Image (spheres, grey):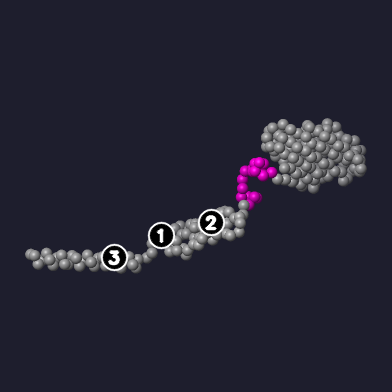
Amino acid sequence: MKNFVTKFNIVLSGGLLLGISLSFVWVAYATAPNPGHNFTEVSGGAVQGDLIYGSAADTFLALAKNATASRYLSNSGASNNPAWAQVDLTNGVTGTLPSANGGRYRTLVTLGSDVVNNNGTANTIATCTGLSFSVTSGTTYRFHATIIYTAAAATTGSRWAMTGPTTTLLAYTSNYQLTATTQTLNYVTAYDTPAASNATSATAGNMAIIEGIVLPSANGTMAVRFASEVASSAITCKAGSTLEWW
């Protein structure tokens, strides 16, 4: 009986040693785990400044650093992968930068086509559609309009003004032609002012300048307005006229 136990222990010990040996062999030659614990075993390595991102399921790549200052991450790479880019002010930002942080800059619109006022009632003011801008309550704006216009006859005068939402502050000047060498000049603090048109114009090549400052007390739209002194006699605000604000 004693010899049997001894032989059994020897066999059992030998089996355990063989099992342990085979385990070491299996570990030594086993396939590396995926994704693994070392980035170099997965996708080829990274260096200083690279950023690691997932390019597919359980797949990692390194986005090489960009040494050009300043660049920011965007989703503009293939399949919306991350890529280095500059800030795109045309579509990469949202909201309005407060003026205290340097968010004010000049914006200019150009009238794309003629706008005619030949209303059947003399001195009826109308908007020069296309020469306008949106304003926000409590924000101060400055504006400047340069307008080219024609008149149906030299005996047809005009008037030029601004309109918009209610204001805390409004002050602007408007000047526009009487003849080739004379003009009408107004300093006003109310919309659609002056109330009356002047008496004459050149038939072509007239210029009106409107510039001023406004602090609106409500959101709304500021717009250039104009009228013809004579019923059914056209004053035409010409394409190419501009309005800028800041």
Q: Check disc 1 and give the amino acid type.
A: His
- Give the mark, 2 or 1, whose residue is nearer the N terminus: 1
Q: Check disc 3 and give the amino acid type.
A: Ser
Q: Residue at label 3?
A: 23
Q: Quadrant of the N terminus?
A: bottom left
Separation of residues labelled 2 and 3 (CA atoms)? 42 Å
- Magenta region: which residues? 88-104
Residue at left offset 62%, top offset 52%: 87
Separation of residues labelled 2 and 1 (CA atoms)? 23 Å
Q: Position of residue 224 (x, y in %)?
A: 78, 39
Residue at left offset 79%, top offset 32%: 189
Question: Can the viewer see residue 152?
Answer: no
Q: Residues within 10 Å of mark 2 (few under 14, many from 20)?
A: some
Question: Can the viewer see residue 29?
Answer: yes
- Give the mark, 2 or 3, whose residue is nearer the N terminus: 3
User: Which of the 4 image quadrants contains residue 136?
Assistant: top right
As rendered, which of 42 and 195 lies closer to the eye? 42
Q: Residue at label 1?
A: 37
As drawn, 44 above or below 145: below
